[in-house]
Image: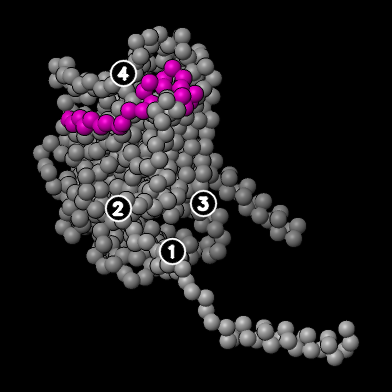
Amino acid sequence: MDRNQFIGLILMFALLAVYFTWFAPEPPVPEELVTQEEAVVEPTQELVSLDTAQTTTTIPDSLQATLNIQKYGAFAFASDAEEESQLIQNGDLSILFSNKGGKIKNVYLNNHLDYNGNQFVLMDASKSKTDLIVDHNGRKISLSELAFEASVNTVGDTTQVTYTLSDGNFSIAQRYLIPPTGFEIAYSIETSGLNNILNPTDINFNWYHAVNRAERNLDDSRLNTNVRYLKADGDFDDLSQRSTEFEEETLGNQVRWVSFKQKFFTAAIITNNAFKSGYVNQTVDFDDTTSVKNLSMQMLIPYSDFANGFEARYYFGTNNYDILKSVAPDFEENLDMGWGPLPIVNKYLIIPIFHFLEGFLTNYGIIILIVVIVIRLILSPLTWKSHMSMAKMRAMKPELDEIKEKHGGDMQKTQQEQMKLYQQVGINPVSGCIPMLLQMPILFSLFFFFPNAVELRQQSFLWASDLSTYDSVINLPFTIPFYGDHVSLFTLLMTLSTILYTWSNSQITTVQGPMKTLQYMMPIMFLFVLNSYASGLTFYYFVTNMTTFGQTVLFRKIIDEDKIHKLLQENKKKNANKKKSKFQTRLEEAMKANQEAQKKNKKKK
C-alpha cells in the first residue's frame, strides 16, 4: 500500500467516525426495556428497608435453643423469657423489681424531690445495675440475663417478694422483705442442688451506680459523693470525697458494708456476715450533667455463704443521723459531721437540740434561730469570762502604755515589766483567749452540720427557697472568680454583721497597729468563701453575729470598769512584794535566753 492509499484509508475511517457520532439515527427502544428512572418503584407497605429486614430476621427456634445452651448451659431454660416488672411501695420507698435477674431495678423516694421538683430516683435502671455472676462449668453466667419466677405475698405487715430460678433439679431464690415504712430492705439468697451445676468458686456481686443529680449545685454535689465501706475488723475507710479524678481501692480483707454516699442520700448493701473481699472505684463524667459521680463495687460472696444461705440488707434512704446509726455499726459515717472532736459535739449536742426542736416546730428558720439562742446561752459563761478579761486589760491600758514609753524599743524589758504588772494585779493575759478557744469546737461543728443536714433540704425560709443550698437574690450574667454567678443575701448580711461586730469589739479592745486593720479582712474573705454555702449556715452566722453583738452591748452595761480598775489597784498594793510565780520565772528565763541568742546572731553577722 502506497502512501496515497494509506492516507485515503485514514480519511475514510475519520468520516465514518464523525457520521456515527453526530449524524447516525438513535436505535429503537424495545418495549420490554425501561429507563432507570422508570425502574424506580414507589415503596409500599410490603417492602421493608435493609435495617428493618435485619432487625426482623428471626433465628429458628432450634438454632436459638442451641445457642442458648452453648452460652448458658443448664440455665438456658430461663434465657428467653420477656422482662416483667413489679412495683412495691411502702411509706418511704417505691421499689421497681425486675424478673430479669430477680433484682431491684428502680428505687424512688416517696417524700423527696429532685431540684426540678420531680420525684427523686435514688436508683435508676438506665444508670445503675446490680448483678450476680456464678461459675457454671467454666462459663461465667450473669444471673441478670435470666428470667426468675416472681411471687408476692404478705407476712404480717411486711411485703415479701421472691424471685426463683429453678428447673426442678436446682433452685436459686432471692427474697426481699419490705416493711410498711423505712428505708431498709432485707435481702437473702436461698439455694439447693447447686453443687451439681456450679463450680465451688466465690460469687461476684457487682453494683454499678451512676448517682442521679438531686441538687441544684452540681459541683458541690460532686465534692460530697463517694464510696465508703466498713471492714469486718471495724476499720472504716472511703475513697476521696473531694476528688473528681478516677479513684480505686482493692479491699483485701472482709467487708461488712459498702455504701454509695451522696450529700443527702445513701444507697448501700450491708451483709450479715461479710463479703470475702472486693474492689471499688469512682469517677466523674463531666459531660453528663444529669449524674453526679459514677460509683462501682465488685464484691466476692464466699461460695459457702451463697450455697448455704446469704443474708444482707439494702439501704436506700436519707443521711439522717438517727436513722443511719440504727442501720449498722458505724453506718452514721455516711453523714459528714467534721473531724477530730467535731463529730462528738454534733452527735451529743447539736443534733439532739435540733431534733428536740423539730418535735415542736415545723419552720426550720425559727429552729435555727432558737438553736442560736440555746448555743449562746450554753457559751455565755465562757463569753462572760472573756469579756471580764478584756475589761481588766482595758482598765490597765494606761499603765501598760506607760511601760512601753518607759522602755522604748526594748521589747524584752517591756514584756518583763508587763508580766510583773499582770502578776501584781492578778491578771492572766491568756485568760481571755481560753474561753474563745473552748467555743471553737461548737462553732466549727455547726459549719459541718448545717450544710449536710437533710432536714433542711428544700425547706424554705424568708427569701431562701432551700436552706440546704445557697440563697440567690440576684443571678449574675457572668461569673466572678472565687465568688460565683449569684448574690447570696444571707452571706451579705453575715458579712456586714461581722464587720459591725468587729468594729464594735475594736472599740473595747487593746488591739493596735496592723492587726486592727487585718481583722476586717476576714469578713471580706468569708463573703467569697461562703457565697455558695448552705443558706441555713449563713443565716445561722448572721443571727449569731447579731446575738453576740447584743450580748456584748449588754455585758458592757453590766461591767463596771471603774470598779474593776479600783480592785486591780488594791491587788497591786497587796502583791507588791509577792514572789514571782514559777510560770513567770520560766517565762522571763525564756525571754532572756531568746535575747542572748539574738545578740549572738547579730555579732556573727
Q: Residue at x 31, y 18 (%)?
A: 164
Q: Residue at x 66, y 51 (%)?
A: 596
- Report the magenta residues as a range: 66-90
User: Which secondary structure lies at badge 1?
Assistant: loop
Judge by depth and name the residue closer to the eye, 278 or 160.
160
- Residue 416 bears which disc, if any? 3
> Which mark sits nearer the N-terminus, 3 or 2?
2
Q: Which mark is residue 164?
A: 4
Which of the two labelled residues, at mark 1 and mark 3, occupies the earlier sequence position? 1
CA gap, disc 4 and disc 2: 43 Å
Q: Secondary structure at mark 2?
A: loop
Q: Residues within 10 Å of mark 2 (few under 14, many from 20)?
A: few
Point 33% across, 71% down: residue: 477
Q: Which percent across, then down, holds residue 435?
A: 34, 44
Q: CA distance from mark 1 to mark 3?
A: 124 Å
Contact? badges 2 and 1 (CB < 8 Å): no
Horizontal arrangement in the rendering, residue 103 relative to residue 302 (left or right): left
